[in-house]
Amino acid sequence: QAEQLGAEAAAQAVRRRHAVLEPGPVAVVDVRLRAQHASGARSQQLIHALRERDVRAEELDRPDRVDSDEQLLVLTRLPRSDEEEGQRLADLLARRPDAIVVHTGVPDAAPDHRRLVLAHGGGRTMMRAAVQLMLEEER
């Protein structure tokens, strides 16, 4: 019951803007420098949530390996205050402006990008809610 309650709260919290996943493979790039290792909230949580929904997903450690046929999800947390994270994000979005940014930090720290998911954390429950939302048609 606690897990169900957490899932419902996560579904209420997660927001998106122009962030709908199309059928097909997905590449995930984590531009965060200090991912939350202690909670296990690294990009594999997003990969796991995608695969649970039968989405073919892979994590790329090198953004230059992104295939143009793959949809791109970019994990962020502090792109406005962390100069390196912000630069990695800017470089990636310059090459792939169609990418969906999945922001795991506080909303005020989110990048200004047209295709955005505000996930409020990078743990499994929040990533499941983010994936669910991205798989739904926008209303």
Image: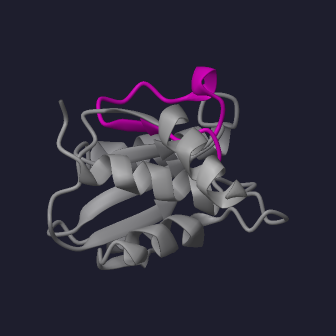
Q: Which residues are magenta?
A: 105-121
Residue 119 magenta-highlighted: yes
Q: Nearer the viewer, residue 25 or 87?
A: 25
Q: Main secondary structure of the magenta part?
A: loop
Q: In the figure, 87 relative to 59: above or below?
A: above
Q: Judge left or right: residue 13 versus residue 23.
A: right
Residue 31 found in image quarter: bottom right
Q: Is residue 31 visible?
A: no
Q: Nearer the viewer, residue 78 or 129?
A: 129
Residue 68 found in image quarter: bottom left
Q: Residue at x 66, y 59 (%)?
A: 3
Q: Residue furthest right?
A: 38
Q: In the figure, 94 relative to 108: above or below?
A: below
Q: In the figure, 45 relative to 57: above or below?
A: above
Q: Residue at x 59, y 40 (%)?
A: 9
Q: Judge left or right: residue 65 versus residue 41.
A: left
Q: Is residue 83 visible?
A: yes
Q: Nearer the viewer, residue 61 or 104?
A: 104
Q: Nearer the viewer, residue 4 or 67?
A: 4
Q: Quadrant of the image for the N terminus?
A: bottom right
Q: Residue at x 29, y 69 (%)?
A: 26
Q: Residue furthest front?
A: 1
x then y, percent, for residue 94? 31, 43
x then y, percent, for residue 37? 79, 65
Q: Residue furthest top?
A: 108
Residue 6 magenta-highlighted: no
Q: Judge left or right: residue 39 versus residue 96.
A: right
